[in-house]
Amino acid sequence: MRPDNWTRRQILGAISAGLVLPSAALGFGADSRFHVAEIDLGRGSLHRPQAWKRMLHEIIQATSIEANPISVRVDPKDPALFEHPFAVLVGDDALPPLEDEAIHQLRRYLSYGGFLLIDDASGTGTGAFAKSARDLVRRVFPTRPLSPLPGDHALYRSFFLLDRPVGRTRGTGVIEGVQLGPTAPLMFCPCDLSGALDRGADGRNTIPLAGGESQRREAVKLSINLGLYALTSNYKHDIAHVVELMREGRIE
Amino acid sequence: MMDWWFNGPLSPQGELTWGLPLGWIALALGIGFLILFLTSRRQGEGRLVELVCSALALSTVIWGIADPIWFEADGRTEPGRTVVLVDGSRSMGVEKERGTRALRVLQDIGGDRDVYTFGEGLKAGPPQDWTGSGTDIGEALDAVADRYLGQTLRSIVLITDGIDRGGLRANLAGENDTVVPALPGPLTVVQVGETISGIDNAVSDIQTGGFAFLRTPFPLTALVEGAPESELAVTLRREGRLVDTQRVTLDASGQGNVRFEVTPNAVGRFVWEISVPDAVDDAVPGNNSHAVVVRVVRDRTRVLQVCGSPSYDQKFLRLFLKDDPSVDLVSFFILRTHEDFASGWYPDELSLIAFPYERLFTEQLETFDVVIFQNFDFKPYFERDPNGLLRNMVSFVRSGGALVMIGGDRSFDLGEYAGTPIEGVLPVKLGVKGELANEKPFRPVLADGGNQHPVTRIAGTIEDSEAAWARLPNLDGMNRNRGLAEGAAALLTHPELTSEGEPMPVLAVREIGEGRTMALMSDASWRWSFSEAATGRGNQAYLRFWKGALRWLVADPDDRRVVVQPSAENVLLGQELRVTTTIRDAGFNPVEGVRYSGVVEAPDGSRTMVEGITDTSGIGVSLIQPTVQGAHRVRVTSDDQGAAETVFSVVTRDPELAEVSADGEFLARLAAAYGSRGAFRGPGESIDPLIDPTAVRVIDEQRSVSLASMPILALIFGLFGGFAWWTRRRHGGL
């Protein structure tokens, strides 16, 4: 029932009920709500907390997800990594080689349900950061290389229907991922998504985009889809959804 | 007088036998004469006379020890006997009149006669029941000839319906001359039971795969019989309820096949019965239906996961459910609520579909085994008839479905379930006043009995399970509740919070009707997976918890606390069947020493009692041997533990029952085969058995006389022994 349909009696009833109704919780504990952990590798990696807070705010506004709009920095060797099932690694230059301990923990993290987005802040997908990130992925999953996600991947329909990934740039035009069973717990974004989302302390966008605000809007949509995909994985590939979307002509 | 000295008259045709083995007799002789030799005098007069007399006296002693017996055999003749053979096979029991008439004929014959029952070998005496499984008249007549070999019988009376399963009937029906058993007397064949003419509709056989999968179609194919080229309406019933009807046209031989395809919607053993209608003057209405039991098993557990808000908890549960090959998962996540509509995104940008709540919670609900409400508040979505949909959920649970409610800010009291039909099936009581949730992190503790329950038994031993729970990470908070609902059990409780004076349940379960429910008052069970993985121990605790929960929730009939199982769903007539009763406690541990009792009810209403006491494995076994074709229902009760039931079917088309019309033609032909020494008596005719007045039998007589105790032996011993003693003393011996 919408408020504009309410009668005066109903509105008064609701107000009086609100006075006596017990308080309701918004999820149990902030740590259990969706949030972001930035993996800190020092040289080569970047820290863009405002970008991820923006993503989380957009998720809160657009979706039913209870998110906690915070971004924390985590060392890949720190067991606290497992407190944060959604992690990002942003960089614009070659990453330092990781210790074996960190590689093992990352493998365990991703194998048991964690999600890692690697965002190439250079926006090329082919530079020094991309090369060192690929080396990192190869060490974490020696037998499972990064490969382009197909156009009908669940990432592109987890909330919005997307044709292609867009960030500050268009990068190589595809997001790559490592597939573990039915899900892809690690994704490589070549188009500087965090650059498109980043904001200054005054709330203004840090980096102007060539495509203007419509391009930034697409970047926001991609970030929301990433959050949804991290939580629901291939939910949008369930047969009930595919059939309904096809019936409505929204996918082919 | 002479006979007295020899214990009676001795015939010269007799034969001497020895009671003592010859070896022992020789040994006694040797010892005796050695003693004689050692004690006899070596010199002096009369020595020879004394020796001879002593030897003769000693011989009488040894004779007595050797136990000689005089054995005489002789015989005398008497008039021949009358032998009556009564058919004791099952076909004699299909009509009350048939068996009754057979006994009446037996009574009418009267006099001194030897009575035998045939139908499963030849047994002395009249039939006690009609349970013989194979009528073989030729074998019975042969057995009589063997038993009375060397004699002639005054009369042989055969009482039967003529439904012969041996070769005699077929042979007599053939073109060639058939050799009938040579009999030692005239044969009178008495037919009992009427020869029935007309059409016999029948279901001859049903073929199934033996078992079927839940919600997967399987075929039942039946062979039906009736009038050639006629049309029959064939019906299929499940547990007595009509499922389908098909019409089939029979071929020129009066046979036809009909195939039903059915989709079972419940797990367990079920009776499927195929039947055809009675024809006008149906020869045997009893064979117009045929029942089989098909065991329906679950190949995959079908789970509906409904989540009000994507979260880490939902993510990890979905990962588990999707990864389990035994689970068929259907998920519906609320990705956007009414409050999100103002966020500025156009509907056609979104990939969202409408939540088909009406379809899910009405027509599709029964297709699921488990429904999970994960932090799901129904009110914003169940726009039409919300109470009706929730009542559907209650019916779903009571009829065998499972419901799991997982905590969160949209669940339990926060989801406004208090006072709804759902509350009536939940394991915890709602209607909390004041603070509806407690957000303080806590580590739940195992409740009494929680360490044994299959849901919370997450390690091989109780000790390991308790250790695992003690080291699992904290939960982030919980939905408060007012304690356990009636009949529910707490498995995990809060270490500090209480409700109604007891530790507040964090995880609780409840059996209600045929179904089960589980309440997990937290939305942070994901930490049992992910935080545990951080320590390098993997996520076994989480996986075992949810696997155990699913297994307990779907509780197939064979996984309940009291279970009764037949050793086979379909057995042959007369085959021994094991009925196994298993009794477990609330923790699913076997219970020893429980007395149970029950009854096996046959389709004819007859009952067989079963009872026993469970062994150390919690198992009791009863053996039964069903004698009636059709579906049997087994019900077992234990006063303390509950009750269970199952079904099995006796499926063999009993040859004794496949044909029940008496075969007078064969019996007449059999009597005729003996010429003047054979006579046939049809139903209603006087028995008047053929008699051979010259028949005699020789009575063997045997007589044995003990020669060891003959009085003459004492006389001989006294005379010769005394004379030897007198001779010895007279000549100076001592």
Image (cartoon, rainbow, N blue to C red):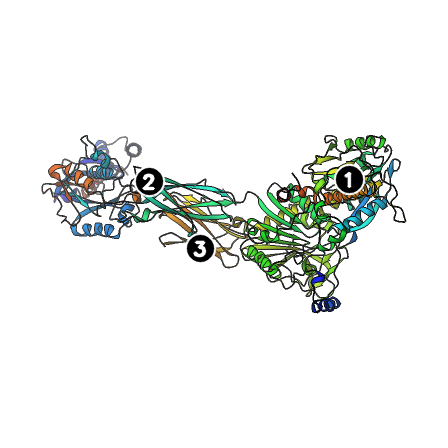
Give the alpha-carbon distance from disc 1 to disc 3, as whole Å: 61 Å
Amino acid bearing label 2: Leu
**Mark identifier at residue A116:** 1
The quadrant of the rendering that contains the C terminus of chain B is: top left
Label 1: chain letter? A
Q: Nearer the viewer, residue B339 or B162?
A: B339
Which of the 4 image quarters holds residue B386?
bottom right
N-terminal-most mark, 2 or 3: 2
Residue B509 shows in this picture: yes
Task: Give the residue pinned by disc 3.
Answer: B598
Q: Are marks 2 and 3 in contact (CB under 8 Å)?
A: no
**Mark identifier at residue B250:** 2
Amino acid bearing label 1: Leu
Q: Secondary structure at mark 2?
A: loop
Dot in front, 2 or 3: 2
Q: Nearer the viewer, residue B53 or B176?
A: B176
The quadrant of the rendering that contains the N terminus of chain B is: top left
Question: Looking at the picture, does residue A20 appear above or below residue B588?
Answer: below
User: Is residue A57 rendered to the left or right of residue B722?
Assistant: right
